[in-house]
Image (cartoon, helix red, strand yellow):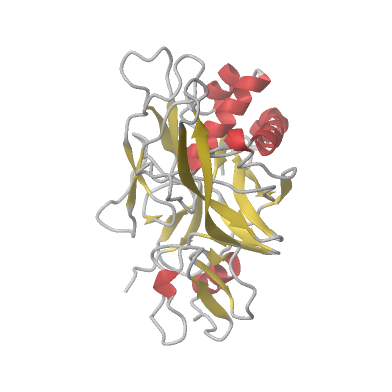
Amino acid sequence: MSEGGASKSYAVRFRPAGPWRFGPDSGARDRVDLICHSDAVFSAVCSAMSQLGFMEDWLGATARSAAPAVRFSSLYPFRGDTLLVVPPRSLWPPTESAKVRCKGARFVPLSVVASLLDGKAIDENRWAVDGESKCLVSSDGTGGPFRIAVRSSAGVDRLQHGNVEPHATACLEFARDAGLWTVVEFANDDAAARWEAPVRSALRLLADSGFGGERSRGWGRSEAPEWEPWMPPQAASTEEPGERAYWLLSVFTPSAGDAVDWSRGSYSTVSRRGRIESSARWGEPKSATVMIEEGSVLLAGAELQGAARDVAPAGFPHPVYRAGFALTVPIPWRASV
């Protein structure tokens, strides 16, 4: 619960109009990441807010605020009506079976997470792991929501005739009924009243202009975003005894007020880098940041907030924020076996 009322959340779907690319930390062109982390989603929205004329107010309400008005999850795949997500590390993988190699699944359906929260075993006859997308999918042969492809192109030197530099770039190609989705969470009714319309405009602009890499080639674009109310999975019984934990749907940088019990929980880290897209100076590397990864389950005395850090290199003309705001789902704490 936040001041001014409960948070208001939406699941927002993007139906790709072509390939999408999320560059790996190594920067290798022939590799592609399978996830667009929440800090990259926030950076993209900041770029759109700048074009829409909201930048200073937006940063004041988010990156420069101790309690951000808006938070985003990372971008996860969906296919048909099935939304997939990085599952809680404390519950996944379940006990290994002969039929389903659960360790190979990076993304699982929300319905499976709900079953795990209720302490139920997954039905091994219903599910299989798609090796390419690392998604837990229906065993009826539907397949994963995307596949990895490598597309070739060439750079042509306009000054030296005949000087051509071919290269190959990896990307994600999506099934007809598949795409990516994110959670947009407004802190309370006042935040929603102020920022829902600008965020909708920003995401529509990004759908038209593109997320991720190779946007000059038309990659990363989608149809108009589809918004629907978001209700996270939860255990059927909310009265069961025991500790509550926080399942991260975003990458996370702790704030000074986040009292996390780092001696327990089930979490992993990821190193985030990237390059700056600014009219001031384009392409300079951001400072590397170690963040808590999606799917981590943390124990804390209160809801996690997270923080945004300035990752601009020394002497850069303005701050460059990497958002580590926590978008979480409270779940019962069960230590992984």
Between 263 and 203, the one nearer to me in the picture: 203
- Horizontal and vertical percent for residue 135? 52, 66
Q: Give the total of numbered labels.
A: 0
Relative placement, left or right, of 300 versus 56 is: left
Identify the residue at horizontal 39%, vertical 63% (top origin).
Answer: 89
x%, y% of residue 195?
Answer: 67, 30
Query: Which quadrant is the C terminus positioned in?
Result: bottom left
Q: Position of residue 189 (x, y in %)?
A: 68, 36
* 269 relative to 198 in the view: left or right: left
Q: Is residue 68 visible?
A: no
Q: Quadrant of residue 333?
A: bottom left
Residue occupying image coordinates x 45% and y 39%? 305
**Residue situated in front as seen by the camera: 4 or 305:** 305
Q: Quadrant of the N terminus?
A: top right
Q: Residue furthest front?
A: 162
Name which residue lies at 34% across and 56% down.
Answer: 267
User: 70 above or below 332?
Assistant: above
Left or right side of 285 for 136: right
Does residue 205 lie above or below 229 as drawn? Answer: above
- Identify whether 267 is placed above or below 122: above
The answer, for residue 25, to whether it is visible in the render is: yes
Please name the residue shown 62% across and 51% down the image. 181
Give x and y (percent) for residue 143. 60, 71
